[in-house]
Amino acid sequence: MSTVVLLLFTGVGLGAIYFLVASGLSLIYGLMHVLNFAHGVFLSLGAFLGFEVASRLGATTWTGFAASLLVGALAGAVFAALTERLLVQRLYERHIEQVLVTVGLGLAAVALFDGIWGTDPRFISGPAWMGRTTSVLGANVPNDRFVAILVAALVLLGMVLFLQRTRYGMIIRAGVENRAMVTALGIDVRTAFTLVFTIGGVAAGLGGVLASHYFGYVSPLLGQTLLIFAFIVTVIGGLGSLTGAAIASVLVALLQQFANYYLAGTGDLAVVVLLAVVLLTRPSGLMGRRA
């Protein structure tokens, strides 16, 4: 019983990190129809800068950890906003060019991170409480899982409230439905779309810092590795559906954890099989709109 509980909490914690990465992808594609293969760069940059700040302020203090989250979120936001303004904004409705540019940016950024921080992983530590465990139904659950779950839940709530209850949220949704009409009303849709990218960058930056604590290290390829699973989550959940991304994140992570433990490390294979089943039976995803 304790093993099942541990796998459940570990899977949900990993799912929280998947969601932080996939939510930005889902939001950007669902609202703007942009395929952003450089999204993992936002995560890696946030993780590295968060690591640097925590190292200087005290990696084992709550001040250092809070500062790393703040800096990671800001780093992801700034890089995402610059990417949209300088590159993606010129390529709306040109999907092939979007793929080529964002893939190229992702490869160039990884090479840059290799040059700055090296190719070897940097092992990190956090506040003492996060390194300890809490007993839940006989299972000793690492406390950093609870932090990841809490942050992901707050990000999901914040995104939903922003899109449903704020003026810019309404502008973004209206701009997606009829960009020409919104522009004719004198509203600058470009600024709203940059804001969407920025929000996705914030979530990815937070995900980068939390992922580095979950895995215990940060490396130039961390973002690109998680990006693969984020794309899988986005497709399974339904492109453009935040709720679908949240459900699919937990589903994929739980399947991965249980398959790795009970089926001799076949978690990644099980996820790919699930992706194939969803694509064959429901191409729009679990919560996506049917064509």
Image: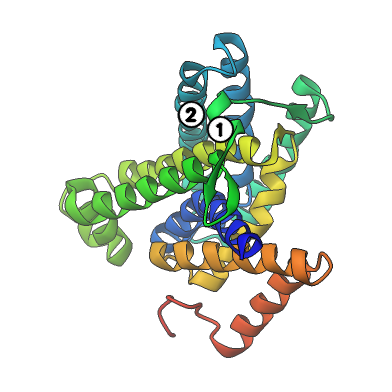
Q: How are the colours assigned in the image?
A: rainbow
Residue at horizontal 31 percent and vertical 51 percent from the top:
157
Q: Which residue lies furthest to the bottom in this view?
A: 281
Res. 89 visible in picture: yes
- Judged from the image, the secondary structure of the residue bearing numbered disc 2 is helix
- Neighbourhood count class around disc 1 (C-alpha, 10 Å): few under 14, some 14–19, many 20 upward: some
User: Tag 1: residue type?
Assistant: Met
**Marking on residue 130:** 1
Residue at horizontal 42 percent and vertical 76 percent from the top:
287
Image quadrant in which you'd find residue 242: bottom left
Residue at horizontal 42 percent and vertical 39 percent from the top:
198
From the top left corner, tell me how far across and down residue 109 is, in percent.
Answer: 70, 34
- Judged from the image, the secondary structure of the residue bearing numbered disc 1 is helix
Task: Determine whether 137 is above or below 291 in the image.
Answer: above
From the top left corner, tell me how far across and down residue 231 is, in percent.
Answer: 61, 61
The residue nearer to you, when weighing 254 against 119, is 254
**Marking on residue 69:** 2
Residue at horizontal 39 percent and vertical 42 percent from the top:
194
User: Tag 2: residue type?
Assistant: Leu
The residue nearer to you, when weighing 190 against 38, is 38
From the top left corner, tell me how far across and down residue 116 is, in percent.
Answer: 75, 20
Q: Which of the image's four quarters has the C terminus?
A: bottom left
Res. 36 visible in picture: no
